[in-house]
Amino acid sequence: MIPLRDNIRSRSFPYVNVAIIVACVIVYFLELRVGPQTAIEQWAFRPGDLVPGGPSGLSHAVTALVLSMFMHDAPLPWHILGNMLFLWIFGDNVEDRMGHAKYLLFYVICGTAATVTHSAFALITGASSLPMVGASGAIAGVLGAYFVLFRHSRVRTLVPVFFMFMVWDIPSPIFLIYWLVLQVFSIGMRTGVAYLAHIGGFGAGYLLVRLFADTGRRPPPDERRPPRPPPPPRPPRITRLRIE
């Protein structure tokens, strides 16, 4: 299923969300310029960097952890296009509820939690040297926050049905739970995707959103306005009075 848009309008311009998208696009083209393999070797984060006294050193590990949140698998564009589409649809509303500065901090924390979740699994399975790139974990945190904040919303979705595509308005909880279930059942598949990072990021966003935003339900605008009193009755008028 491919999301097209949601039905929640932001009250403010999502400066941070747009800046993250622009940063990801810039880093993607820098990867193409220096060569995708070279960029991964020099910039990407490896789970082994979390081990004390790792080969890369602490400063490189921290830099790679943050930079990896803005890297994507190049030269194929599908990875970055899919991530940016999800961030564009769901991120603006979360930023609107949190505020710009809190949203940026929330995004980085969720991305870090996603990286740590994947790295723990990689260290156990012996895949600590494999590089990790992509904003998917941080974006998954945004999805977790959206699930809490906007359960009443609907997502216009492109759904494949046999050999056709249909457009349905799906309640956001159903869409996001479906997405999360796909990640769970995809664990262990040899696709090169860090599905545990997605799950870890979503869980971090779901839990941490209460520290960054008011999770109380906000009624629709029509419900916020006090009811108008009924208009006063119009005084009677006598017209064409005729006495015979």
Image (tube, helix red, strand yellow):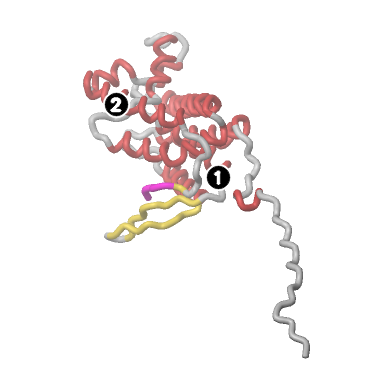
The dot on residue 126 is none
* Residue located at (26% from left, 22% from top): 31
- Secondary structure mostly taken by the magenta-highlighted segment of the chain: strand
Quadrant for residue 209, please give it.
Answer: top right
Q: Which residues are magenta?
A: 1-5
Task: Determine whether 95 is above or below 239 in the image.
Answer: above
Q: CA distance from mark 2 to mark 1?
A: 31 Å
**SS category of the residue bearing label 2:** helix
- Where residue 100 sits: x, y (%)? 52, 28
* Residue located at (40% from left, 25% from top): 69
Residue corresponding to mark 2? 28
**SS category of the residue bearing label 1:** loop
* Residue located at (35% from left, 59% from top): 166
Task: Determine whether 50 is above or below 232 in the image.
Answer: above
Residue corresponding to mark 1? 150
- Where residue 57 sits: x, y (%)? 41, 9
Q: Quadrant of the C terminus?
A: bottom right
